[in-house]
Image: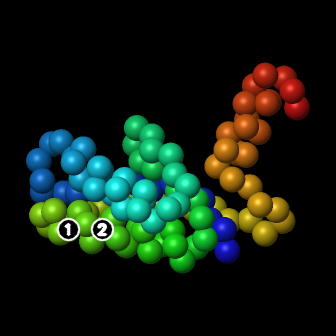
């Protein structure tokens, strides 16, 4: 099943800056070969369900391995069975409405 998620992994107990931990997750997502787009408060990831959930697990493992004693994660996800829709398709749909094309 194809899934698109919005993932935000936040290490706790590591100080104020978490950019190095975010970079660890980005490396894991890249290594998994999934389509993704980082944004200011998380990352959108798309792919097959098992591959996406495996990379979420790997992000947690990497952040713990880097010394974070706790992690809090928020995740929104969506699936659909009526047709395939990518992250880009979703953005394009809204951009078309904004430009009056739809």
Label annotation for residue 9 = none
Residue 77 lies left or right of residue 18; in this view the side is right
Q: Between 2 and 102, which is closer to the camera in this rendering? A: 2
Tell me whether circle 1 and circle 2 mark residues in contact (CB < 8 Å). Answer: yes
Q: Give the SS element for disc 1.
A: helix
> Residue drawn at (48%, 72%), measured in percent from left and top?
53
Seen as rendered, the residue at the extreme right is 102
Give the image quarter of residue 63.
bottom left
Residue 7 lies left or right of residue 102; in this view the side is left
Give the image quarter of residue 65.
bottom left
What residue does disc 1 label? 64
Specify whether residue 9 is in view: no
What residue does disc 2 label? 60
- Kindly report the distance in space between the C-alpha atoms of the residues bearing marks 1 and 2: 6 Å
Q: Give the SS element for disc 2.
A: helix
Q: Where residue 79 sits in the image (x, y, percent)?
A: 68, 65
Residue 89 lies left or right of residue 18; in this view the side is right
């Amino acid at each position: 099943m194809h899934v698109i998620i919005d993932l935000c992994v936040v290490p706790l107990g590591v100080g104020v800056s978490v950019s190095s931990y975010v970079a660890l997750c980005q490396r894991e997502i890249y290594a998994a070969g999934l389509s993704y787009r980082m944004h200011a408060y998380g990352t959108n990831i798309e792919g097959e369900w098992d591959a996406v959930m495996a990379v979420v697990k790997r992000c947690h493992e990497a952040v713990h391995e880097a010394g974070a004693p706790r992690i809090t994660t928020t995740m929104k996800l969506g699936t659909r069975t009526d047709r395939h829709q990518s992250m880009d398709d979703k953005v394009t749909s809204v951009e078309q409405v904004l430009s009056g094309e739809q």
